[in-house]
Image: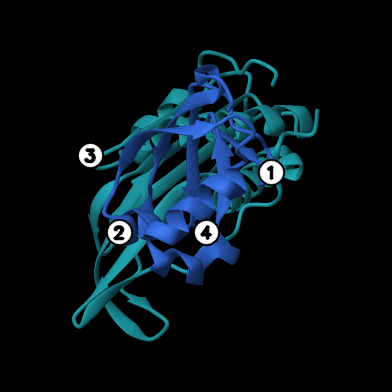
Chain colours: A cyan, B blue
Amino acid sequence: MPPTPDNDLYELVRAAIDPAAIVKHIRAGQAGAIVTFDGFVRNESHGRATKHLEYEAYEPMALAKMREIGARIREKFAIHRVAMVHRLGRLEIGETSVFIAVSAPHRAAAFDACRFAIDTLKRIVPIWKKEYFQDGSVWAEGDIPPAAQEAKPAS
Amino acid sequence: MPSVSSSIRVKVLFFGRVREITGLTEEEGEVREGTTLADLLERYMRRYPQLAGFRASLVASRNQEFAEWDTRISNGDEIAFLPPVSGG
């Protein structure tokens, strides 16, 4: 896996995510474009009113996979910096669960990289969400990560 | 009889639905040399029959990397049986 620059940001946090601080972190003169993805807790799931969510992670593996996604982004797209932050623990409706920001010299790479980052995160990063309703709770259906070989970065 | 050196130590981690079914977050144990990830899961399914219903949805990891079920366990490995992921 190619090294990712020190100023990229990969974090699992238990406190509220501060999108403005993350954007500031990746903003730089040589960029010129930033695209962000703010994923936050929806108030319903399959027509049932959600009370709150609980996230848990296989933390060291999740961080390794987030860094791996960052490395794949750098191979595929001409970007400047990337930040991926996921929150764990109990989250209330409207709170940000994941925030991704990519800066790049030009907008197309920033859009493409940000989309790739969230899509791949949802597919391969070992994080689990439990949805709590008025009358019970369920583990979100989720994605089965692809076979071991496919889940590795394209070398 | 295989010698004592054929016994290898393994740490198993449990997450999400698998954690809830087993009531375990982490367990250390010993397996015989040649034991695969599939064999180890089989052992847990005997202990926790409810796991069998989710067998097809689980993927294995070895030392924090996705791994094929026929991977043999090495001494000191950290193994997990991961339910479908649902971050984001």
Q: Amino acid at mark 4?
A: Pro
Of pointers 2 and 1, the one earlier in the residue sequence: 2
Q: Is residue B39 above or below residue A134?
A: above
Q: CA distance from mark 3 to mark 2?
A: 24 Å
Tell me the residue that label 1 is attached to: B68
Dot 2 and dot 1 within a common chain: yes
For mark 4, what is the residue?
B84
Relative to A18, say whether A5 is above or below.
above
Q: Where residue B20 is drawn, which disc sits there? A: 2
Q: Which mark is residue B81?
A: none
A124 or A24: nearer the eye?
Answer: A124
Q: Nearer the viewer, mark 3 or mark 1?
A: 1
Q: Tag 1 or tag 4, which sits nearer the N-term?
A: 1
> Which residue is at a point 38% across and 46% down the rendered structure image?
B14
Is residue A40 visible in this depiction of the protein?
Answer: no
Q: Same chain, marks 2 and 4?
A: yes
Which residue lies at the image location 33% right of the left edge and 63% below the top edge? Answer: A130
Which mark is nearer the camera, 2 or 4? 2
- Residue type, mark 1 in image: Glu
Q: Which residue is mark 3?
A: A15
Q: Position of residue B69 (x, y in %)?
A: 66, 47
- Label 3 marks a residue whose chain is A
Are labels 3 and 1 on one chain?
no
Residue A134 x/y as whole percent: 18, 80
